[in-house]
Amino acid sequence: MIRRAALGAFVVLATRGLSAQTLPELRFEGGYASVRQPGFNGQDTVPAVDAALLAIYWRKPTDRWTLYSSGNLTYARDSLAAAQAVAAVVFPWLTNEHLRTDVGATGATFSLRSAGRGGNGTGFIRQHYVRDAWGAWGGTAVGLTVRDGRRRRSYSGDIGGWTRWRFLFASASVSRQNSDDFPLLFASGGTIAPFALSYELEDWQFAMQARRGPHELSASWTDRRGIAGTDDGGEGLSLSGVLQLSDDIAFLASAGRQLSDPLRGLPQADIITASVRVSIGPKPLPVMQRVAIAEALLAPREGEGATLVVRVQAHDTLAVEVAGDFSDWRPVPLVREGSAWVARIPLPPGKHHVGVRANLGPWRAPRNLARVRDDFGGESGLIVVP
């Protein structure tokens, strides 16, 4: 029901200084939620319920695929207690750098105030086409909800696209959902024919995101129409933000209306959350933001050694850093010169390693250097100063 979750008093001991080549990404989130659900058929509204939240997120990248997994627990003193797990594998196409396929599954156990106890399982596949400043996707999913011993099936398909302009990202999508989960839709406020074999909904969603370095502010609006078996409709508006306080700690907040989701068995609800996230490992770049293009060159200087010139072609909204054995793997900020980020670092003769990252993402070798990988999923570039 609530994606971002963790106990407010949850304490994580995050180890800093593991070296620039960090472990696979691991996140813990702890916080609070206020949840208000409509009564049966939307006739009345029950009081808001306070809930404690707990979540863990893990990401493991390799050369050929990336595995994502997460789990969260929502706990209140009533029937809002719920747990959910998600696992997904992302496959980039080796023959086409612009194509990427997502395959995944979710599982949940929950208890809804008006629809009984039960659980849910969902499988999905989505195909992406990604360019530097725009992209598109299409996908399908199937869900099975078991509630009070009865099975409810749901199907969905969606298409959408996104674009980027400076620090702004915008997306639009449309999805169709077909479900026979009458209890869920009825409890969420729709006027539903109780004897229909299935119910079809259409959602149009528009989202906008502003990103400055690792900080984010997002808004989304969803318009729903009943297509078949129901005249259920409505609008959902949500706002969220991420304030990155340090490499490891961020504050997250969100508020808005979540429309009912038959695919995952989730009811309509008005939700407010606040949480703290502790990260161990690199923060990945968003799908919409391609990896920055970095190059490293040596410029001769008087005496021994040379000057390492690192030039990164990346948007001016990114926070770009370089590090290496020359800085004991402490990040060195770059400065903006024209359309690129640039750093100039004096090096003595010998072998050196250098890595570049953007927005606290994974360290990567400049593209014109030989790559050296470590045991932690990171890499650096090897450069030799004569």
Image: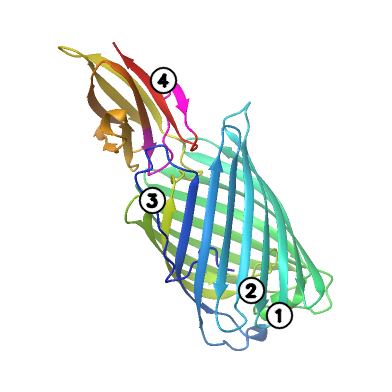
- Horizontally, residue 354 falls left or right of residue 260, namely left
Q: Nearer the viewer, residue 118 or 207?
A: 118
Query: Residue 275 lies in what quarter of the image?
Result: bottom left
Q: In the rendered structure, does residue 366 fall within the stretch colored magenta?
A: yes
> Which residue of the protein is positioned furthest toward the left in this rendering?
302
Which residue is identified by label 2? 267
Q: Which mark is residue 369?
A: 4
Q: Tell which circle, 2 or 4, labels the residue nearer the N-terminal end.
A: 2
Label drawn at residue 115: 1
- Which residue range is magenta in the image? 356-374
* Element on which disc 3 rests: loop
Residues at marks 2 and 1 touching, judged by CB atoms closer than 8 Å? yes
| Quadrant in the picture for the N terminus | bottom right
- Residue type (three-letter) at the residue carrying disc 4: Leu
* Residue type for callout 2: Pro
Say which element carries label 4. Answer: loop
Earlier residue among tags 2 and 1: 1
Label 1 or label 3, whichever lies nearer to me, is 3
Q: CA distance from mark 3 to mark 2?
A: 39 Å
Label 4, label 1: how many angstroms apart (C-alpha)?
Answer: 59 Å
Q: Which residue is mark 3?
A: 15
Q: Is residue 151 above or below residue 319?
A: below
Query: Mark 1: which amino acid?
Result: Ala
Picture disc at residue 79: none
